[in-house]
Structure formats: C-alpha cells, structure tokens
Image (cartoon, rainbow, N blue to C red):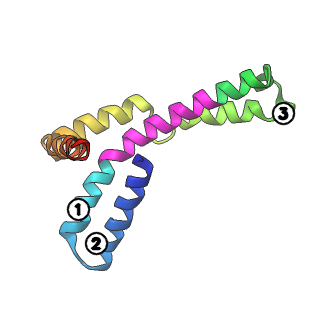
Amino acid sequence: SMIYHSARYADKMVQGIINGDDEEFEKWDDKLGFYTPILKGFLTELGIEAAKHGQQVYGGHGYIKEWGMELIARDARIATMYEGTTGIQALDLLGRKVILQSKGKIIRDYTSSIMKWCG
C-alpha cells in the first residue's frame, strides 16, 4: 500500500511541476520524503528475510556459488547499506524530516489520514 501511495505521490509531484504549482509540488514532495526512508528500511529488511528463506528452502545453497542464492543473499544484505544504513535512514526521518522540516506536522497529517480511513 505504501509503495502504491509513494508512486501516486511522485505522480502528483510531477503534475505540480507540469502545472507550475510550487505549493502542490512541495506538498507531495514532503509526503514522499516521509515515506521514502520508511519504505527503504522495510523493503531492504524484507529482502534479507526473503533471501534467508531461500537459503533454507534450498538447503544451504546460499553458501554454494553454483546456484546463485549466495549472490541474492549478498545483494539483499548490501541493499540495507546503500544510501545509508537503515539506522541512519531512521535518524534522518525523525531528525530532519519530522522534527526540523515539518515540526511534527507530517506525523499529525499521516496519523489523521489513517484515523479518517479507519472511520
């Protein structure tokens, strides 16, 4: 769901650029900036878990080069370090995007949209 929403936010950002609407662009850029580190952390950690399951299913093929699982496991692990580790992404999200840039507004907006959806 978050991936879908992020893609939608990116589309709306582009629409803001096309329409020359800086305010609209900023609105969706802020929302996408909030989602990006969350998605990066979640998806890369999920990739590691999936690679571990693959190793178990293939009975240790994650350690044998001929079958390719070791490459998948290695790639999944390094993905958590690209563009900063998951911990650095979490600090960036909380420190820069939540506290400094939005003064907590992004969290309030996000939780209110969840509450609205829940009814």
**If you read the primary sequence from the N terminus, does the residue marked by circle 2 or circle 3 appear first?**
2
Give the overall secondary structure of the magenta segment.
helix
SS at circle 3: helix
Disc ID at residue 16? 2
User: At 34% across and 32% down in the image, what residue appears?
Assistant: 90
Tell me the crowding category of disc 2: few under 14, some 14 to 19, or many 20 or more residues within 10 angstroms, Cα based.
Answer: some
Does the residue at mark 3 contact the one at mark 1 (Cβ under 8 Å)? no
Q: Amino acid at mark 3?
A: Trp
Q: Amino acid at mark 2?
A: Gly
Residue 115 at x, y percent in the picture: 20, 41
Which residue is under mark 3? 67
Residue labelled with disc 1? 26
Residue 81: in sight, yes or no? no
Residue 38 within the magenta-colored segment of the rendering:
yes
Q: CA distance from mark 2 to mark 1?
A: 8 Å
Disc 1 crowd rating (10 Å Cα; few below 14, some 14-19, many 20+) is some
Q: CA distance from mark 3 to mark 1?
A: 46 Å
For the C terminus, give its image quadrant. top left
Q: Is residue 68 left or right of residue 47?
A: right
Q: Mark 1 falls on what kind of element?
A: helix
Residue 25 is left or right of residue 62, and the answer is: left
